Amino acid sequence: MPDTIIIKKSQPKQEQFYDSLEYKASQKKITNLLYDFLISPPRPYVDKKALALNYYSQLEGKIISEIKIKALDVFGPNFQDTTKTATKWIERTANTIHIKSNLKTIQKLLLFKVGDTVDPEIIYENERIIRSLSYIKEVQFILVQDSIYPGLVKVTVLTKDRFSFGVTGDVNGTSSASLEIYNQNVFGVGHEISLRFLGHVTKQPYLGLETYYKIKNIRGKFLDISMGYLNTYRNEGFSLQVKKPFYIPSIKWGFGADAIRMFRTDRIFDSDPIKTELPMDLSFYSAWGGRSFQIKRDDHTPTQLVLSAGFYSRKYYQRPIPEPDNNQYFSNSTFYLAGVTFTQRRYVQDQLVYSYGITEDIPEGFKNEIVYGFDANEFGNRHYAHLYLSNGNLLVNHKGYLYLEGAVGGYFTKYGYQQGQIQGNINFISKQINAGRKRYRFFTRLNYTIGIRRFEIENLTLNSNHHIRGFRSREVFGKQRLSLNLEAVHFLRKEFYRFNMAVFGFADIGVIGRNDQFILSQKYYSGIGVGVRIHNENLVFKTFHLRLAFYPFHPGDMSFVGFILDEESKRRFYNFEPTEPLPFRFE
């Protein structure tokens, strides 16, 4: 045999520089601390999607002979050691109370069956679908080639649930309060139920109830049905919704229907920004349908063309007296809409973006949409049109995530253009920055919205956390708004009683006012502060949120300092999924 010569490569100069700098910094405490916070040696980008697809591709084309599904306990085991057990009594008790996801429920979510051949893209997409469920913490597909028949493959699906019970609530001064109890995986079959109790000291009923029940993925067709009943000091009525969205690109037909009957309510929809003092009595019905066409069938990032149409009918039995300048806002109407959507979506995997250590599926792609509508309105028929454009991620080599959005739309009548708006959004999320053992991300969000000939009662505010966090004022409103949000997040490695923590600092700026003047000449408001987010990925609980903020340019109905302890829903990524044709919301 010939001699083998082992050549030891010299250490790259770049690595030598960082090693030398780290050694010198470690000689003193202050320099060691600065190095730990400020210096981040270059780290190679890891394409987790490529790694997953490479793993599945090793057995591509082989026949699936067996599928096993194994659900792990909420506390104790993990994918590295499935035999591990919970040690604390509270965790063992939670495992006993919790009902694991029914194996048939998981099986209905599978995009393949016994006898199919291994397709890496389908398996990768299937992981994302199961992982997106609110009651699933993590999922993993394990492929093993048959030891006797090399052409066969056995598939094991490992799932790890979240504890499905949750409790939340809030107190509004001394006048009202609420308490909500919910379960996002009833009996392990994926159904959702919520019971929310609302009480008020002076308004009847003094103690009321809002309840919802949702049945998901009926017969494995991604068809959902949800029902609700409300009887509180705010609302009284019921709702029914049937929906089959374009959840995955392979779905050809999407559709949905809504029925809402409110005998007493202070706003048209639950998310409507405009409240009324006089309770309204109204009904709302809608239905829509759409057909998806795959433009590139063999492409791993399929492009879709979606044609959709629908109608939305609203009728009032009691309402505020319509004023000439606002009459079409509270009007009986039937709105017919049709849309053309051109979209492409794919997903990459990352961690420590909006969650804490679990795999997150981040959408990339684009969604461009044109919608036309006809409003058969009791105060005059109108035409409607809008153009919506969005794209993300435009950054090369995945140096972060960038989302761009632009839209323009409005109504057309015989008297001219009305209820129009122009809006634009920029959202940037940096890559994970590692300084020693510390992990950071930076978030930037810019929004601009202007209303054109909007109704007098329609106004923009800065009250949402998407504009100035913790800002609550009735004095600040307008028809034009510009807001900028900056945030730096430090994900802590240490846990607080099994809860993950993230420390963040933020600076928000908002400009708001009239729509006939240059936006930068309007009134400025701001908020700066720090906070802590606490969350346990094993639970369906919302994220606990502690924040201290200062408002240098605060209005008269706000104080300079704001302190809040509350809960917030996990922020969601922008999605390029085709949806039903809907008019823009001005909020």
Image (tube, rainbow, N blue to C red):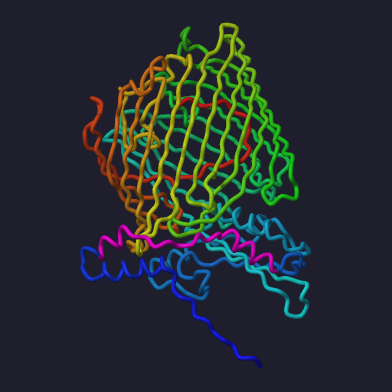
- 560 sits left or right of 222 in the view: left
Q: Is residue 287 above or below residue 349?
A: above
Residue 171 pos. (x, y %)? 31, 39
Residue 453 pos. (x, y %)? 48, 14
Residue 560, image quadrant: top left
83 in the magenta segment: no
Residue 387 pos. (x, y %)? 59, 26
- 99 sits left or right of 69 in the view: left
Give the residue drawn at x 53%, y 37%.
228
Q: Is residue 551 above or below residue 480?
A: below
Residue 371, image quadrant: top right
For the N terminus, give its image quadrant. Answer: bottom right
Q: Please report the bounds of the magenta region as a residue range.
A: 32-58
Give the residue drawn at x 74%, y 45%.
296
- 359 sits left or right of 234 in the view: right
Instruction: Using the image as rendered, state which of residue 99 and residue 428 is in the foreground.
Output: 428
Give the residue drawn at x 33%, y 33%.
509
Q: Is residue 438 above or below residue 78?
A: above
Among all residues in the image, which is located at the extreme bottom?
Answer: 1
Instruction: Using the image as rendered, state which of residue 77 and residue 187 is in the foreground.
Output: 77
44 in the magenta segment: yes
Magenta stretch secondary structure, dominant: helix
Residue 456 pos. (x, y %)? 42, 14
